[in-house]
Image: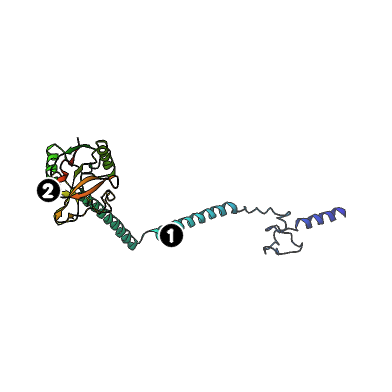
């Protein structure tokens, strides 16, 4: 009795699984409630739950990484393409850049032409300046000779030239002070000395006279010239009664205790004969 019971139980246990899908099913089933297969002829063929092959796991992690990398590369490529499209200069921009470049080039050429013209013009300007201004070496300290003789201004001018110099032209305060020291050292206070300045007849402007007796340089009798404070009071007067005074001389004015500038006639002795022996002139030498 016990053996029969065990056999029946074993048979029941053996037939508790679907031979197709391996699911446990009721003992009296004709069809598998899970997979729907007819299992009536298969009870004896599948005493134990069948081994259902395991489906291989999909490797989703690596696929996701690859997909992400591809997406990133696509985004980068799209950005590069967009940058090329938007940053590429349009024909209008190219034309504007070309115009600016040509404008800059034109400006440089204009400046270059102007510079060349200025350089070409410079020598001519320098020549004009040389004609208008006196020798730049004048105004320095040179050698001076003090000559006492009863002569006219014209004779004094010619004599200095014949000696290899010229009738003194005092172009600076420094030069003037140097000459005054020599005058004081020689005790020449009683002599009035012709110097190399004069004016044209009918003019009121005094200038220095060059070696050819041509007037040049800056006007001497102006408030801006360096010797404006050296004139004798009321001078230049241009005339003394009927006598024209067109030439310059230096004289010591005792009332003021200093050497002063004065205008005088060409022939002082013809106007004031008593000045005989008291006329002189200063020759300047640049050797």
- Classify mark 1: helix, strand or loop: helix
Which of the image's four quarters has the N terminus? bottom right
Q: CA distance from mark 1 to mark 2?
A: 106 Å
At x 54%, y 55%, the residue is: 68
As drawn, is 219 to the left or to the right of 14? left
As drawn, is 254 to the left or to the right of 194? right
At x 81%, y 54%, the residue is: 7
Residue 131 visible in the picture: no
Disc 1 or disc 2, which is closer to the eye?
2
Which of the image's four quarters has the C terminus? top left
At x 57%, y 54%, the residue is: 64
Numbered circle sitting on residue 82: 1
Q: Position of residue 280 (x, y in %)?
A: 17, 41
Q: Which residue carries the number 2 mark? A: 270
As drawn, is 6 to the left or to the right of 256? right
Q: Position of residue 112 (x, y in %)?
A: 25, 51
* Residue situated in front as seen by the camera: 70 or 242: 242
- The quarter holding residue 194 reads top left
As drawn, is 113 to the left or to the right of 149? right
Q: Position of residue 12 (x, y in %)?
A: 78, 58
């Amino acid at each position: 009795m016990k053996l029969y019971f065990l056999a029946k139980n074993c048979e029941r246990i053996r037939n508790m699984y679907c031979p197709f899908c391996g699911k446990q099913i009721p003992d009296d089933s004709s069809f598998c409630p899970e997979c729907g297969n007819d299992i009536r002829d298969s009870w004896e063929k599948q005493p134990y739950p069948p081994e259902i092959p395991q489906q291989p796991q999909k490797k989703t992690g690596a696929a996701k990484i690859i997909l992400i990398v591809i997406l990133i590369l696509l985004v980068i490529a799209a950005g590069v393409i967009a940058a090329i499209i938007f940053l590429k200069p349009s024909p209008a921009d190219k034309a504007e850049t070309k115009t600016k470049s040509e404008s800059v080039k034109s400006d440089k050429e204009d400046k270059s032409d102007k510079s060349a013209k200025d350089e070409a013009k410079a020598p001519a300007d320098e020549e004009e300046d040389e004609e208008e201004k006196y020798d730049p070496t004048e105004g320095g300290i040179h050698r001076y000779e003090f000559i006492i003789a009863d002569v006219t201004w014209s004779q004094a001018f010619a004599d200095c030239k014949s000696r290899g110099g010229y009738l003194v032209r005092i172009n600076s305060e420094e030069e003037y002070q140097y000459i005054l020291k020599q005058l004081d050292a020689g005790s020449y206070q009683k002599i009035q000395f012709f110097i190399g300045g004069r004016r044209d007849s009918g003019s009121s402007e005094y200038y220095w006279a060059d070696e050819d007796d041509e007037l040049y340089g800056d006007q001497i009798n102006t408030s801006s010239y360096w010797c404006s404070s050296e004139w004798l009071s009321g001078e230049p007067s241009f005339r003394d009664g009927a006598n024209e005074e067109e030439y310059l001389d230096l004289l010591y004015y005792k009332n003021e205790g200093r050497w002063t500038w004065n205008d005088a006639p060409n022939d002082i002795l013809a106007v004031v004969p008593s000045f005989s022996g008291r006329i002189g002139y200063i020759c300047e030498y640049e050797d």
